[in-house]
Image: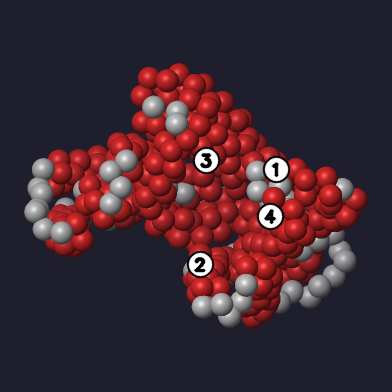
Amino acid sequence: MSLGAQHTIIKFYSSFKDKKSKDSFLSSIIFIPLIVIIPITFLVIEVHDVIGDFLSMQNPIIESYVWVIFLVAFATSYFEVFYAWSRVQLKSVFGNALKEIYPRLSVLTLLILVSINLIDKEDFVWWLTGLYYLRLLIMIIYSFSLYIPKFSLTIPENFKEIISYSIYILLAGSAASLLIDIDKYMIPQKEAISQTAYYAVAVFIATVVEIPGRAMFQILNPMVAKAINNNNFKHLDSLYKKSSTNLLIICGFFFLLINLNINSFYDLMNNEYYSDAIWVVLIISCAKLIQMSFGCGPAILATSSFYKITLPFSICMAISVYFLNDYLIDIYGINGAAISTLIVLFVFTVLKVMYINYKLKIHPYDFNTIKIVLLISLIYLIFNYLTFKFSPLLDIAIKSVLISIAYISLVYFLKLS
């Protein structure tokens, strides 16, 4: 619903060199989401019942909350806009806490209130909606405390380019989102519905590997955009290599903790069927580790002059996953879906690295990359055969401490970072 305005702020803000042009840009960017919001508002008003009937086919409760979905989408869209506003000032910690922690704490608090009968389920929905708007208000105040422009109705000279970029990035993001959801759509067509649940839990566990990357990108992306806008390719090369090395080290640590403790973790769940997806965790976490080794590559693609390549990449990835899933799920079940994701992410990460190297003559890897991969592999092979016979929770604690000592010590002594 934001029409990619948050990405547009990241790309263009540092290209404006004086306060007047920056203020004009920020003034106009606030109105970009309205290009989508206003038509959607009229659409919801006119065909509210049709939308409600469609959304409630699987869950009748949703019909009563069509407007809630719209209101939350509005609040979330503008939150992202003002969060990007703070990120270009290189202040991302507070906004990231509001984005990642605030919603979870809000839901947890409201669920507790429901459980002790202080509010009912309908109150829960409206309170949650209100809390999303409170989050938006806090983000607006914080963003203005960092930088408040002199608002004007002046349109930037490159406004047409800004709108074009916003729409293009929105399309690329929509295509990329298919890569995330296509597995959950295809598995039920070929396997028992329970397999989808096992797969979803395994993927959720595996994607913990990329959490450090998501946090780092909040500050990296504006720095990448600034380096590109200033034609500072030496600094861009440094960011590219350092982000790749550091993310591979940090995410590799998460990779080891997850995969070397996965058996004990599934024992804690006390459901033997979920453990059928252990290979999914390993395969998807490998895919995510490869993706993280790309460093700030996605930001380079999205904020450079050749950003239009992101849409063909996203479409080709989605199509590739679809056909690989169609073939491999029949042979390997849910493991086949995971293998499809691994193959696609590996192949397209290589292609993206080659494309950036072709365009800018920079790449993210060096000899340290090989040493880090060998270190992760060695520790995995050693600790994979180390088992304890205590309770699952104690096994996880002991093994995690040993892995941490071994990994951190070797990273330090080998001077990998």
Nearer the observer: mark 2 or 4; the answer is: 4
Nearer the observer: mark 2 or 1; the answer is: 1
Q: Residue at x 51, y 78 (%)?
A: 116
Q: CA distance from mark 1 to mark 4?
A: 10 Å
Q: CA distance from mark 3 to mark 1?
A: 23 Å
The reply to whether the C-beta atoms of the residues labelled 2 and 4 are less than 8 Å apart is: no
Dot 4 or dot 3: first in sequence order is 4
Q: Is residue 170 left or right of residue 402?
A: right
Q: Pointer 3: what residue?
A: 180
Q: Any mark on residue 375, and which? A: none
Image spot of residue 133 (x, y percent): 69, 72
Q: Pointer 2: what residue?
A: 104
Nearer the observer: mark 4 or 3; the answer is: 4
The reply to whether the C-beta atoms of the residues labelled 2 and 1 are less than 8 Å apart is: no
Q: Pointer 1: what residue?
A: 57
Image spot of residue 384 (x, y percent): 15, 44
Nearer the observer, 356 or 256: 256
Categorize mark 1 by other alpha carbons within 10 Å: few (<14), some (14-19), many (20+). few
Give residue 272's quadrant in the image.
Answer: top left
Q: CA distance from mark 4 to mark 3?
A: 26 Å
Categorize mark 3 by other alpha carbons within 10 Å: few (<14), some (14-19), many (20+). few
Amino acid type assigned to the residue bearing label 4 in the image: Ile
Q: Residue at x 56, y 77 (%)?
A: 117
Image spot of residue 53 (x, y percent): 77, 45
Q: Pointer 4: what residue?
A: 61
Nearer the observer: mark 3 or 1; the answer is: 1
Q: Residue at x 50, y 32 (%)?
A: 188
Amino acid type assigned to the residue bearing label 2 in the image: Arg
Q: Is residue 230 left or right of residue 31?
A: left
Dot 2 or dot 1: first in sequence order is 1
From this viewpoint, is residue 297 visible?
A: yes
